[in-house]
Amino acid sequence: MNVIFISPNFPDNYYHFCEELKKNGVNVLGIGDCPYDQLAQPLKDALREYYKVDTLENYESVYRAVAYLAFKHGKPDWIESNNEYWLEQDARLRTDFHVTTGFQTSDMHRVKYKSAMKEYYAKAGIPTCRYHMVSTLEEGKKFAETVGLPVIVKPDNGVGAGDTHRLSTMEELEAFYQRELDEPYIMEEMVRGVVCSYDAIINSKGEPIFETGNVSPMSIMDIVNNEDNSFFYMVKDLPEDVRSAGRRTVEAFGVKSRFVHLEFFRLQEDQEGLGKKGDIVGLETNMRPSGGVSPDMHNFANSTDVYKIWADMIAFDHSEYGQNGEHYYAAFGSRRFNRPFKRSHEEIMAAYGDRIVMQGPVAEALSSAMGNYMYIARFKEEEEMLTFIRELFE
C-alpha cells in the first residue's frame, strides 16, 4: 500500500502518523517544502521517499511530485495531509489521480463552506444559527435588525478563526461594509453557547472506531483578535448528546475513512429558534484532526494512541487499539509572552509538574490562535483542572 502524506513535518507531531503507517507495512511517501536535511530523524526513518517542492502553494509542482512518486512506487492508495489548509488541494490531487479513498473536489463545497454545512446539519436534525451571505449594507442591516446585535462575520470558506469578527453596533456593521472583500463572507446571529466538539476516527463504513471531544470555554475569535491566553480541554468522558450529534453529523455528511473534528455549541441559555439551555447546536465541520497538539491530548485524555488508530484505519479499516485505559481531563493552557503573570514557569512546574505531560513553545504558525508557551496537564477531577488554569493565567 502506498500513502502519500502531504507536509508530513507540520505540525511537528504529525510524523507520528507516518511512523504508525510504516509499522503497519505501508510505503509512506512524503511531499513537502521543507529541506530533507531539516526533517526530524524519526520522520526520515518513517518515509520511504521524500519529494521536496519549492512551495506547496503551487499545485502544478505538487502534481508533478505525485506523478513522479506514482511512476516510481506505483499508484497511490491514499493522499492525505490531515491539515485543514491543504484539504482542497488534497481533494484535487485525489480527483486528478483517481484516488477514491477520500474526499474529491466535488465534495469540497459542503465540507468547506460554512453556509453549505447548514443543510447537512439540518439533515442530521441539528439546528444551526440563522445566516446571511454578505452583500449590501442595506441587506446586512435588515439581517441584523431581524436577529439582533451582535452578529458574527467571517469568510464562508475560512480556516480556524481567521478574519472572524463580532459586530456589536450599527457603526461597527457600517465600518465592516467599507472593506473591500475578495471572497464570500457569511454573517450569522450570535449564539450564546460554549463550543464543544466531537472528534472521531471513522472507518470506510462510516462507523467510528475512536471517539472523544473537547470543550473550549474561551472564544477562539477573541483569543485571536484580542491576543488572549488560550485554554481548552479534552473531556474525561464524551457526553452522550455530543456523541449522538457527532454520529448523526458524520452520517449526514457521508464521512468515511477520516479523522474528523466536528464543532457544536452547547447553549448557555434559552435562545429562540435554537433551543433550550444545554441543547446542542451545529457550528461547523472540520474534516481533519483538531489542530496542533490536540492528537497528543486525545492520547493523554484516553490513555490511547490515535496516531496508531488512524494508521490502523488506513491499513486495516479497524483497530484493536481502543479507549479502555483510564480517562482524564486533559487541559491545554497557553500564555502570551507579552502578559505579566503572578506565577513563574518554575513555580507552575513545581506545583503541577507531576500532572504536566507536555510543555514548550507553540509553533509560530499556530501562536495567533494558541498562544506562545503551552502547558498540557491531565487531571482526574474537573475542579482540579480549573484551579490549574486559574493559577496559570493569574
Image: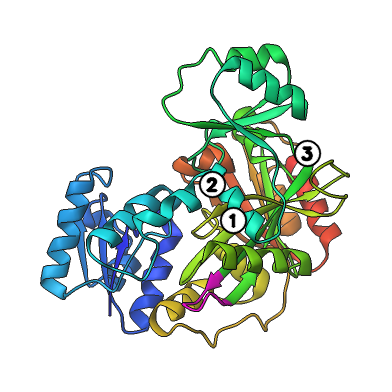
What's the magenta region? 201-208
- Residue 296 rendering spot, x and y as whole percentages: 56, 64
> In this orientation, which residue lies closer to the viewer: 92 or 382?
92
Q: Earlier in the sequence, mark 3 or mark 2?
A: 2
Q: Where residue 116 is drawn, which disc sits there?
A: 2
Q: Secondary structure at mark 2?
A: helix
The residue that disc 1 covers is 120
Tell me if residue 164 is in the magenta stretch: no
Observer able to see residue 149: no
Mark 3 nearby-residue class (10 Å; few <14, some 14–19, many ≥20) = few
Q: Most prominent secondary structure in the magenta stretch?
A: loop
Where is the N terminus found, in terms of image quarters? bottom left
The residue that disc 3 covers is 394
- Residue 285 rendering spot, x and y as whole percentages: 57, 53
Q: Amino acid at mark 3?
A: Glu
Mark 1 nearby-residue class (10 Å; few <14, some 14–19, many ≥20) = many
- In the image, taking residue 326 as reference, residue 86 lies left or right, namely left
- Picture residue at 55% right of the left edge, 57% below the top: 290
Q: Where residue 43 is drawn, which disc sits there?
A: none
- Residue 47 rendering spot, x and y as whole percentages: 27, 70
Q: Amino acid at mark 2?
A: Ala
Q: Please determine whether, in this image, residue 87 is positioned above or below residue 183.
A: below
- Picture residue at 64% right of the left edge, 76% below the top: 303
Q: Amino acid at mark 1?
A: Tyr
| Distance in Å between CA atoms under marks 3 and 2 | 41 Å
